[in-house]
Amino acid sequence: MIVLISVLYQGIRNLTQDYVISRLQHDADSLVAALHQNSEGLWSLPTERMSTVYNRVQSGHYYLVTVNTQTIRSRSLFDTDVELPGSAPDKNRCYPMDGPGGQRWMTCLQKLVKKGSTFTLWVAEDISPQEKALQGFMLFAVGAVIFTVIVLLLMQYHILQRGFSQLENAREAIRRMHLGKHDMFLDKLPIEISPLVDEIDRLLRQLSNRVQRSRNALGNLAHELKRPLQRYRSQLGALSIEQRIEGDAILQEINAIVERELKRARIVGVATPGRHTVIDDDLPHLVKIMQSLYPDKIIETNYAKNLVLPHDRDDILELLGNLLDNACKYAIRNISICVQRIDQGWQISIEDDGKGVTPNALKAISDRGVRLDENVHGHGLGLSICKDIVESYSGQMIFEAAKSGGLAAVVFFPDIEESYRYQCL
């Protein structure tokens, strides 16, 4: 638009100047025709044959004629001196120049011969009114263009906002999906993205079904292992004491693995890939399961209302389940869990009032990559799984002595953006 306005300004200006130059040429022809030589050989311009505009001082129309040593000036020039080029041009020459009183003159200078005498004819016209009118028009044009651009931008914004507002249904559907709600109808989506949304929904449901089938198969396998293990236990009586002790230790280890897998299936429940963790909905259910497993323990919870962790529900429930199971197993009576939003992330802390661990064992628990369920007696069942889950979100998990005397597990998850940036680096 700036280029177009510049071209328009220059075009109108050239057109105006060309029109003024054509008028000056007509005036020059009239002056040449009016030139009269008297009997004494002097040249003059009869007033009756001249336009009255040349008789008013600074009227905006001027002429100057020189022939030999004689100079004929228009009355409109009054006492204004005009500097002409040193030599008259062979052809008509037109150029702008500054005049008195802030005027802007367009002048034409030409050389001609009449009755054997050589004349230099100079005519001028004030074009400052035209230039002011042109400037006013261009200001109006610029204002009109700016106004039009603003109106077009507002119209474009309104059109885009109205078009993209239809995507709000998809955004709401994804938000409700993260919260585990599937009561959002997607039939009002634009037809351009409906196939994409349908495909994503189909893939999520298919993934959920596969995860659930795998978990059910694992649970069924654990149940099926119990019967042959019981039969094997009944056969231990026929063995020697040493063989019986070794076989019983193997059975206890296998039984612990089976119980752990069954407990994980109970903790997580229905598989929901991609769903966020709604603390109000998920934590009370987990606490209820733990209290049914450990009826003599008291679990206190502390979290803000409507708190949502933007992490996978299955991962968070498995993390909380293992930490709570560990705390309940070794607590005397009281366990506390606190989930809160802190600067640039979320923090989960679980404490128990058990006997705790020694400083050396506490240092071993905090070491990165240690398989705690194999190296530390007491606290540690499933903690290696917890460490893997926390590290998958670029988080941190530390262990310290609790205020109540037991063990405190503190987990920090950074914001999703910070976690993603860390993983990229």
Image: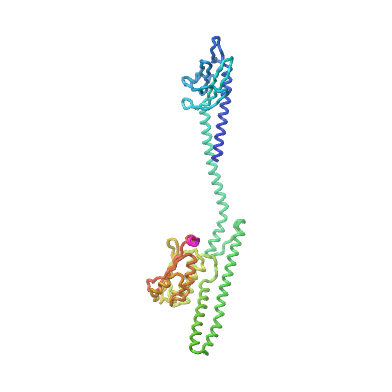
Can you give x and y, in whole percent of width and height, for residue 146 in the image?
53, 41
Q: Name the image quarter holding residue 166.
A: bottom right
Quadrant showing the N terminus:
top right
Residue at image point 50% right, 68% down: 315
Instruction: Please identify the residue farthest to the top as the structure is shown.
Output: 39
Q: Is residue 284 visible?
A: no
Q: Nearer the viewer, residue 275 or 4?
A: 4
Q: Name the image quarter holding residue 232.
A: bottom right
Magenta run includes residue 421 = yes
182 left or right, relative to 328: right
Magenta run includes residue 197 = no
Q: Is residue 384 visible?
A: yes
Can you give x and y, in whole percent of width and height, for residue 140 in the image?
52, 36
Can you give x and y, in whole percent of width and height, for residue 330 in the image?
43, 76
Can you give x and y, in whole percent of width and height, for residue 233 in the image?
52, 85
Instruction: Please identify the residue farthest to the front as the structure is shown.
Output: 87
Q: How many marks?
A: 0
Residue at image point 57% right, 75% down: 217
Q: Is residue 92 above or below residue 202?
A: above
> Coloured how?
rainbow
Q: Is residue 193 above or below residue 63?
A: below
Residue range highlighted in magenta? 419-424
Residue at image point 53% right, 35% down: 138
Secondary structure character of the magenta stretch overall = helix
